[in-house]
Image (cartoon, coloured by chain):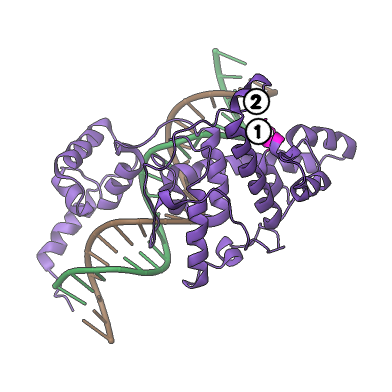
Chain colours: A purple, B green, C brown
DNA sequence: AAGGAAGGCAACCGCCAACAA
DNA sequence: ATTGTTGGCGGTTGCCTTCCT
């Protein structure tokens, strides 16, 4: 056992007593930035002390990671990023750090806040719609959010006969909101998988016919830089973006339970580091081919 | 214009795992 | 093997701003 260093503890207690909390002042920010740029990352409690900040190391770490880091992307999430967040959340659940690791320039805190506020907003919207006593009215309003009903969704997701399905068209036209499906219990994980497969296929179709779609007022601009210059690392498995394939694999999403109340790691089984981990690896390779991610 | 409600976001808290002594 | 420290993470809180009445 380590011998307790009484003097060090005394010093630490003195530090703790005068530690600041709450919002960071511009002066504190400047100190931390200057120190980090000069000395680089190290032990955060040392950084706090050496930078002359009356903050705990944890606080400094959080401030740097979430706000001061020079590579942070500020501003609202693009629709591409929103789609990706939704997709990644369907895989990782609330593992925000995992999601953030795949969105360059975004922090877990930022994504978490976005998810919580967006979901809250949409849940509220949908709840109020569901509570409406006039069913025909609510259906009309709902159709404004979701341009098709459950039956349509199932038909669309099952119909692979046409080269571009009606759902793909919806996706291309930005009229489809997968959030609504989950929030409203409109579909289970299998359906969501199908839908994202459609989205993926739709976007790929769009990729080649962007100009035509734009002329028709249909398409969004997905002509984005490729991801191939990036190398994404998961916690345990480095993922080589170059080796991606171009088709989403949701084969294991056969769980018919509703996503709400289910842990995603339970659904796809990556909590235990066996096959699930391998599956996750494959999934993540698929994700790196997400065609409409704007970096 | 004023006050309350809602939304957005930065920061804190508590837990856990890894590591060092 | 045990204990303390540190870093990382997700959940939560509370403040500030914007919107609505």
In the rendered image, which quarter contains the N terminus of chain A? bottom left
At 69% from the left and 21% from the top, the residue drawn is A216
Quadrant (top left, top right, bottom left, bottom right) of the C terminus of chain A? top left
Q: CA distance from mark 1 to mark 2?
A: 9 Å
Magenta-drawn stretch contains A8 = no
Total marks in image: 2
**Residue at horizontal 63%, vertical 37%?**
A205
Residue A128 disc label: none
First in sequence: mark 1 or mark 2? 1
Which residue is drawn at the image coordinates 52% and 57% (left, top)? A283
Q: Is residue A134 visible?
A: no
Q: As drawn, is C10 to the left or to the right of A210?
A: left
C15 or A72: nearer the viewer: A72
Q: Which residue corresponds to the image point at 68% horizontal and 64% vertical from the top-left?
A: A255
**Residue at label 1?**
A172
Point out residue A42 in the picture as x, y percentages from the top left corner.
Answer: 19, 52
Relative height, residue B18 to residue A248 (above, below): below
The crowding category of the residue bearing disc 1, from other C-alpha atoms within 10 Å (few below 14, some 14 to 19, many at least 20), is many
The part of the chain drawn in magenta is A169-176
Disc 1 + disc 2, Cβ < 8 Å:
yes
Q: Secondary structure at mark 1?
A: helix
Residue behind mark 2: A213
Residue A274 percent across, percent down from the top left: 48, 73
């Amino acid at each position: 056992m380590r011998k307790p260093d009484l003097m060090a503890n005394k010093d630490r207690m003195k530090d703790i007593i005068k530690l600041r909390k709450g919002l960071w002042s511009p002066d504190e920010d400047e100190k931390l930035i200057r120190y980090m740029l000069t000395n680089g990352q190290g032990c955060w409690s040392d950084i706090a002390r050496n930078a002359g900040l009356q903050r705990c190391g944890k606080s400094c770490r959080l401030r740097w990671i979430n706000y001061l880091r020079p590579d942070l992307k500020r501003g609202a999430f693009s629709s591409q990023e929103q789609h990706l967040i939704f997709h990644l959340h369907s895989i990782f659940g609330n593992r925000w750090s995992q999601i953030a690791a795949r969105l360059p320039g975004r922090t877990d805190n930022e994504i978490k806040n976005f998810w919580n506020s967006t979901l809250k907003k949409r849940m509220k919207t949908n709840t109020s719609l569901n509570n409406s006593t006039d069913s025909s009215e609510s259906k009309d309003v709902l159709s404004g959010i979701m341009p098709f009903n459950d039956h349509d969704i199932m038909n669309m997701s099952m119909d692979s006969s046409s080269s571009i399905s009606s759902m793909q068209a919806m996706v291309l036209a930005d009229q489809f909101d997968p959030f609504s499906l989950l929030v409203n219990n409109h579909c289970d994980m299998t359906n969501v998988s199908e839908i994202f497969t459609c989205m993926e296929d739709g976007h790929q179709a769009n990729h080649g016919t962007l100009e035509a779609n734009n002329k028709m007022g249909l398409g969004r601009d997905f002509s984005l830089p490729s991801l191939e210059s990036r190398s994404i690392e998961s916690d345990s498995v480095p993922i080589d973006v170059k080796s991606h394939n171009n088709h989403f694999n949701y084969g294991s999403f056969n769980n018919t339970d509703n996503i709400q109340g289910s842990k995603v790691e339970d659904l796809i089984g990556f909590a235990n580091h066996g096959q699930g981990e391998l599956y996750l690896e494959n999934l993540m390779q698929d994700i790196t081919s997400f065609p409409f991610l704007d970096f």
